Amino acid sequence: MAENNDNHFNEEDLSHSTRRGFFKQSTAFGAIALAPGALVRAAEHQWDEKIADVFEKIPLNLEVNGVKHSLKVEPRTTLLDLLREQLDLTGTKKGCDRGQCGACTVHVNGVRINSCLSLAVANEGKKITTIEGLANGETLHPMQDAFIRHDGFQCGYCTSGQIMSAVALVKEGRTKTREQISEFMSGNICRCGAYSNIVKAIEDVKNSGL
Amino acid sequence: MESAGAIRAVGREGNAHFLAGGTNLIDLMKMGVVTPEKLVDINHLPLKRIEKTATGLRIGALCSNSEVADHPLVLREYPLLSLALNAGASPQLRNMATVGGNMMQRTRCPYFFDTAMPCNKRVPGSGCGALEGYNRMHAIFGASDKCIAVNPSDMNVALTALEATVHLQGPRGERRLPFAEFHRLPGDTPEKDNMLEKDELITAVTLPAARFPEHVHYLKIRDRTSYAFALVSVAAALQMDGGNIREARLVMGGVAHKPWRLTAAESFLKGKSANEENFRQAAQMAMQGAKAYAYNQFKLTLAPNAVVQALKTASGITA
């Protein structure tokens, strides 16, 4: 969050329960309620978020792509929104936000889930892997490489979820037949219809024994 | 926090819910259908074991759907349960969803989900939008003019066929229910899906000693090949003596407010030869009391055909 030196409401005042902090909070509420100018300033300085911070957020510690985070999270935040909005990891996509498309697929402790239906605060101490965490520096993960070589995407919106799901699928050993691949990838929907090439990419990875 | 603490936390609040996998609850919350003020996260409770017991198998209520479906004991002794679980949702959802949560799953009726629509289940007394509305996915058995919704779970159909027992814990101690008595018919009180009290927690499901390690099938008919709810589903489990049926279990899903056990058809098949003629007769008996609505008349034909197909596959007489 941006620091602003001419702002006489600083974060420390607003988040400590000191008399000074309390008066500044209530004055802030009053100012925002009464004066349009104050409203604009409030929006600019994200005072609403800072005030909400005091009342609503709870601590959360988790690891994302090997990096440990200590965060404060509003309890209703989904894991998907945490990743995209708070951690700026926008590779994971919001397709339906209801667990019906799979675009939001990530790994939690190595297991593929729909992050749109997981509350962030329920992931305390967990290890999350997103699409951003697959590559090794500049070297693509074999599944990413296979998707490119087999043209396993068109618009690319479902692709992060497809790749995350596919990596887990191979680890689960669900690649015995094309039918099995299709069935166990059925939680990832592709509106462009790249399915046949996605299956080819997965078979490629399976056959190279990775 | 152990179970008693979680139960107290939910029991004393007016508007608190247990949170397990969240795959149904969070969806309902996003739609504004369910609006709890507090969630009690029960994911750390010690209810995750799958273990053989003296009388059969015990499955902790917090086991994930995929853990249960893939467990060697389940695959070997209760394969019908594995088939039914894998027919539901998607791999991602099955990794998150729990056994207890799957039992508690709410209907997919669009009028229930849309807070602008009349729904006696969501708001008692507001009416049933599906009765004269778009009722393609709705019941043909056991409905009332208050509610024609169906229970969407595949797991529930298999657990009914396998005659499981539900284990509940409340402030007054533990109790057990036969699985078939857990879910209710709508009657005049469709807001109550099941027999769970507000301050009770499902702790486990137990299965009796394995009777159907083979000759089982779960047939799920839906608009897509996968990742969709059932129009009609059939769980069939047979004990065979050569070409004869010694014992049959038959339960339908997607057709009622709870899994629909086909008791008359089961009795008819006992001791009969496994052939199409007998399967057709059993299917016809199964349709006793069926009543369809404007958009689900097709289920009156689809359901008996599905029963025949499931029996054929389970008995192995033809594909």
Image (cartoon, coloured by chain):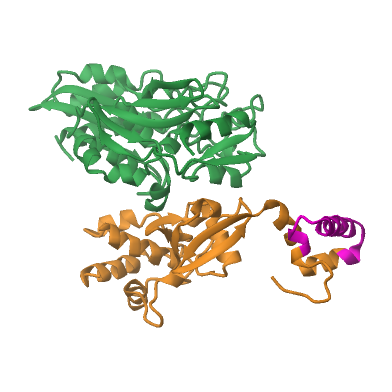
Chain colours: A orange, B green
Q: Please report the bounds of the magenta region as a residue range.
A: A13-38
In the image, A52 versus A173, the foreground residue is A52
Q: Measuring from the top left, give residue A48's x and y in whole percent.
A: 76, 60
Front-most of residues A154 and B60:
B60
Residue, far front: A18
Q: Residue shown at 41%/41% (left/top)? A: B98
Q: Main secondary structure of the magenta part?
A: helix
The furthest residue to the left: B242
In this picture, is B293 found above or below A17?
above
Q: Residue furthest bottom?
A: A138
Q: Horizontal and vertical percent for residue A210?
A: 25, 70
Q: Can residue A46 be spotted in the picture?
A: no
Residue that appears at 48% across and 52% down: A100
Give the number of callouts.
Answer: 0
Q: Nearer the viewer, residue B266 or A20?
A: A20
> In the rendered view, would you say B192 is above or below A53?
above
- B135, above or below A124, in the image: above
